[in-house]
Image (spheres, rainbow, N blue to C red):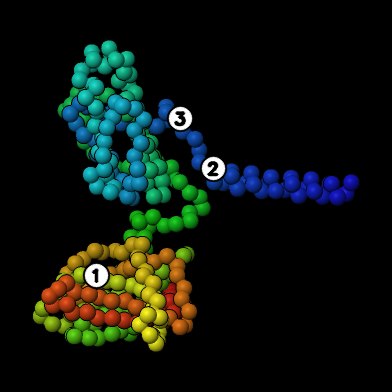
């Protein structure tokens, strides 16, 4: 009897705690009547601009068509089915409800109800997705969006460089520096500067990151693991004298027998290259901000 009571109590506590979690993470449901209304006219494209890259767009009816001309812009138009109000009436199309647009981004979703506007001169050609229209897709947040990674990177860039860089390599009158390493949750931010002390501009072919063995006894035994940044602040392809950038990686580890290698490669025919080795201790001593 006592055993059953304890079991029931544990089950009760489990369901209460589970209910509490769902109560915190639940996204309030929205009905069509709750959605923000957008108006669109024949022959006019409506551009919906998102602060984040758009993952996909859903158009609920055949009255609407669209595409993604840029990673953060959805372009929506009325299909040819609506040649005139009378044609719409014959086809039983409700001009006050042409459909619902759902825009899914990295950390939120936005939905709009589309109405028909008969006055082309009053048609709006572009809108920005507003915070009140954003429905978060995850809670608590498990990953940073590109917008958040950009904000962190800009915060790092605004920091004044103090003291010597963590790592520095000089070759062919080129300098590669790691100014600092930062960690935010499971993200590693590398603050790097490249300097060119020649009068010949540098055309960047690639900046490559990898984890490799410290000592190579045989060429066939060398294991190289490529590391791809999930985000970088700038995508500059050339620089004259100096170039500073922030590279972001998801958390990674490697043993003391390996090092992280960073290579700056120039486009042919000049082909100037510079390479740096980074110890794991440099990553472990990363700052937070």
Q: Is residue 237 visible?
A: yes
Residue 58's x, y, as percent? Answer: 35, 36
Of residue 34 and residue 82, the one placed in the foreground of this image is 82
Secondary structure found at label 1: strand
Select label 3 or label 1 by which is in front.
Answer: 1
Residue wearing tag 2: 26
- For marks 1 and 2, give the one nearer the viewer: 1
Give whichever of 75, 161 is nearer the camera: 75
Give the side of residue 273 with respect to residue 138, left or right: left
What residue is shown with label 3?
Answer: 31
Measured Cα–Cα span from mark 3 to mark 1: 49 Å
- The answer to whether the residue labelled 1 contacts the one labelled 2, judged by CB atoms less than 8 Å apart, is no
Determine whether the residue tagged by mark 2 lies in a helix, strand or loop: loop
Question: Which residue is pictured at 40% across the width and 42% down the height?
Answer: 109
| Residue depicted at 50% across the width and 38% down the height | 28
Q: Residue at x 20, y 70 (%)?
A: 205
Residue 182 position by quadrant = bottom left
Q: Position of residue 105 (x, y in %)?
A: 37, 46
The first of marks 3 and 1 along the sequence is: 3
Q: CA distance from mark 1 to mark 2?
A: 44 Å
């Amino acid at each position: 009897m006592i055993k059953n009571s304890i079991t029931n109590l544990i089950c009760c506590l489990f369901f209460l705690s589970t209910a509490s979690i769902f109560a915190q993470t639940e996204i309030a449901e929205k009905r069509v009547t709750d959605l923000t209304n957008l108006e669109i006219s024949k022959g006019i494209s409506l551009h919906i601009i998102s602060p984040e890259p758009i993952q996909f767009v859903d158009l609920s009816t055949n009255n609407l068509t669209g595409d993604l001309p840029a990673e953060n812009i959805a372009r929506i138009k009325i299909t040819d089915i609506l040649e005139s109000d009378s044609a719409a009436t014959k086809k039983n199309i409700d001009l006050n409800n042409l459909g619902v647009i759902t825009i899914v981004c990295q950390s939120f979703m936005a939905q709009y109800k589309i109405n028909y506007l008969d006055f082309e001169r009053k048609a709006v050609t572009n809108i920005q997705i507003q915070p009140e229209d954003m429905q978060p897709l995850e809670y608590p947040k498990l990953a940073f969006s590109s917008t958040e990674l950009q904000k962190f990177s800009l915060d790092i860039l605004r920091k004044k460089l103090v003291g010597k860089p963590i790592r520095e390599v000089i070759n062919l009158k080129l300098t590669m520096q790691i100014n600092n390493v930062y960690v935010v949750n499971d993200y590693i931010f590398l603050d790097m500067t490249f300097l060119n002390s020649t009068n010949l501009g540098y055309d960047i072919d690639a900046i490559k990151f990898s984890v490799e063995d410290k000592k190579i006894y045989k060429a066939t035994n060398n294991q190289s693991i490529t590391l791809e940044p999930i985000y970088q602040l700038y995508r500059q392809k050339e620089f004259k004298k100096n170039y500073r950038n922030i590279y972001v990686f998801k958390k990674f580890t490697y043993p003391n027998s390996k090092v992280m290698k960073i290579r700056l490669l120039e486009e042919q025919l000049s082909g100037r290259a510079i390479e740096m080795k980074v110890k794991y201790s440099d990553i472990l001593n990363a700052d937070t901000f």
